[in-house]
Image (cartoon, coloured by chain):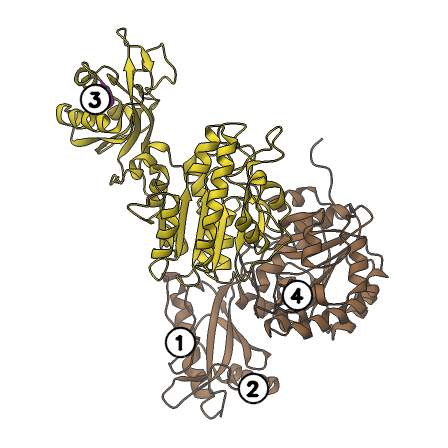
Chain colours: A yellow, B brown
Amino acid sequence: MPMADITSLWEDLAWERGGRIVYLVLDGVGGLIAPGRGGTELQVAHTPHLDALARASTCGQLEIVGPGITPGSGPGHLSLFGYDPVRFRVGRGVLSALGIDFDLQAGDVAARANFATLDSEGRVSDRRAGRIATDLNQRLCEKICAKVSLDFEGQFFFETVSEHRAVLVPRGEGLGDDLPDTDPQRTGIPPNPPKARHESAKKTVRLVRSFLDQVNQVLAAEAKANGVLLRGFERYEPIPSLRQRFGLRGVCIADYPMYRGVSRLIGMDVVPHPGGVEARFETLQSIYGDDYDFYFLHIKKTDSLGEDADFDQKVAMLEHIDTLIPQALNLSPDVLVVTADYSTPAIMGGHSWHPVPVMLSSRYARIDSVDRFDEYACAGGMLGLRPGTHLMGLALANARRLQKYGA
Amino acid sequence: MPMADITSLWEDLAWERGGRIVYLVLDGVGGLIAPGRGGTELQVAHTPHLDALARASTCGQLEIVGPGITPGSGPGHLSLFGYDPVRFRVGRGVLSALGIDFDLQAGDVAARANFATLDSEGRVSDRRAGRIATDLNQRLCEKICAKVSLDFEGQFFFETVSEHRAVLVPRGEGLGDDLPDTDPQRTGIPPNPPKARHESAKKTVRLVRSFLDQVNQVLAAEAKANGVLLRGFERYEPIPSLRQRFGLRGVCIADYPMYRGVSRLIGMDVVPHPGGVEARFETLQSIYGDDYDFYFLHIKKTDSLGEDADFDQKVAMLEHIDTLIPQALNLSPDVLVVTADYSTPAIMGGHSWHPVPVMLSSRYARIDSVDRFDEYACAGGMLGLRPGTHLMGLALANARRLQKYGA
């Protein structure tokens, strides 16, 4: 007998009233102790406001997807929002398209595209075409859209993301997504020719083959961006919104396309111009009120610096963020959560599977003895070690947005 | 990919021998720190016997239904008994009928009934008919059973619970339960007319409509109890017993209908007259022996005082219960568990989602360093934070009632 997904139970119990919830997501905040540094990034950073908040919160650790699983950004955030990322699989193609405000429709197939450099033999010599400037990317996308013509009852879109990154979206009836990447993931070999892994993808393969043949013509004269690599083909099927599931009217304050995309995917409004880190806290204060129940403020820099393996700058960024925390506290939200979507330890230079620290402040929280916001202190908190999806249920409960279960 | 329900594995491994298990369930015992009181109800209470037992136990926290879920009494107890309350859904109608020793049969529909006061326009003016005395309730039920006649191949029962509360049970073929409450849940408006939400409930709706029309005639001359409101219609489908699942012959020592009902539902014997709190401990001692393997002693007052938001009286009740604990210890049960079915913090005045403290004493328990029975101390125990359903497996194992899994 299968266990029900606990997140479905919240759907049954949530009502569209109760308190307001603020999530501060410090992307990739979890770390590891760096040799000679005396601690993790959070331990080394001087963060008096985060620590004071920990003393007024219930704390714990979240295992975002599962034991040993290193989450990508999409699954990481879905989990925090109460969407089991194993049940709700959303790939980077769909998220990239959503993240540039592209109006994806059910049945569209989205794929991530890179402008790339091909040598005279057609082998990939640079998978990112020297990271061309975004404005060149835009001109090339316009040219491709104008000159490429695909022979089918439908249409396609080829849109700039930034630098060398773009998105391809074929739209039409019967487009499957079961085809491998054309991006070979290394240089010195040609792109993989499009081919179907399943009957259902044959039509898509025919279109993609024709698209790439024509693109190679259109870009032939380009010095760097003379080819396109595709990966992560994915058919878009809408998923139920935060409001439909949990009765939450949500708003996203994030600048990075991925996080804007995942927010839009679950029906949140997305602030058009969130600005820098300070501006995002100001935006939070200006929009906090009757229009929304759920506020998602995202900070990417903690993750980027972790990916750059820059321990010191990650520490400095944490100290800077700490000075902004009072602006969130001043709103006295019914529930205030600080956490991350995964760990990005500077000594690893990338995402990791390690649980993230979490703290939840509310008038109903069982405040524990944790007195610092870091991985080790939070591990002693009363929330214990839990799956990331649990967070949304705890936030909803603390905001008094869930009815009692059964009599 | 569905996860297996771990409780099913115990079914495979349980044998009908081993030690005896005693559950002391202090209803709603979990609390929150009250401002100015220096702690939770359990922390403030002077409970030397419970604390001594904690020092001789393995301790932890139980999350009864799931993160953020506030359990009702039925799901709360099912969880403690090893029945996943999301898989085994039982409503208050069935539990109320079972709780008055009514012999429910498969396919019966049970609904909770309130005697109510209707004004001259037929609007509800008191949903509880001034909480009429139980003996008046009994006379009215007898009158209704004598005078009301329903035109179908079957029978109906209308039985007193206590004060204004009663139970209606239609019995016959093809009775569905998909109909909303007639109780409008507030005064100043008429009861909701019975109507089917689904085709399968049409026959039930016809019976209920006829029943209520006749009841209004029968009660017309009553000053207060001149109407009946119905809620929680529910078809009874038996669920496998504690003995069938885990090889346990169980007995319930509880006074409140709900807990007697949930015990009967899973095939436990129910002590007919459990008396007050002291008497229940005496009863435990008198029946402890060869007839039963599992003893469930339930105390409701801790929850009622929490619901009344009476911090001091909840503390006093805990101190009183503490003096009785030696009577359970004197039996030297193979496994002694003290816990709750949910938290009822006095500062919230109602059930909550917070985990409950649990302690388990047995000669095989890994005794930890927890030295007090309260929410915070138990959170540091070796059982960790677990779903409530885990408790039964741990109790069975400590009673040596589970075989090895696999070779």
Main secondary structure along the magenta-highlighted residues: helix
Residue A211 numbered tag: 3
> Are the residues flagged by discs 2 and 3 in contact, CB closer than 8 Å?
no
Q: Which type of secondary structure does the marked residue at label 2 adopt?
A: loop
Please give the chain letter of the residue carrying mark 2. Answer: B
Left or right side of A109 for A40:
right
Who's the residue at 63% across and 34% down the image?
A38
Give the vertical position of A120 relative to A269 (above or below). above
Pinpoint residue B334: horizontal percent, then vertical percent.
81, 52
Using the rendered image, report if marks 1 and 2 lie on a common chain. yes
Residue B209 numbered tag: 1
Q: Can you say which quadrant of the picture contains the N terminus of chain A?
A: top right
Give the vertical position of A148 relative to A298 (above or below). above
Q: Nearer the viewer, residue A315 or A40?
A: A315
Q: Which residue is mark 2?
A: B132
Q: Nearer the viewer, residue A105 or B327?
A: A105
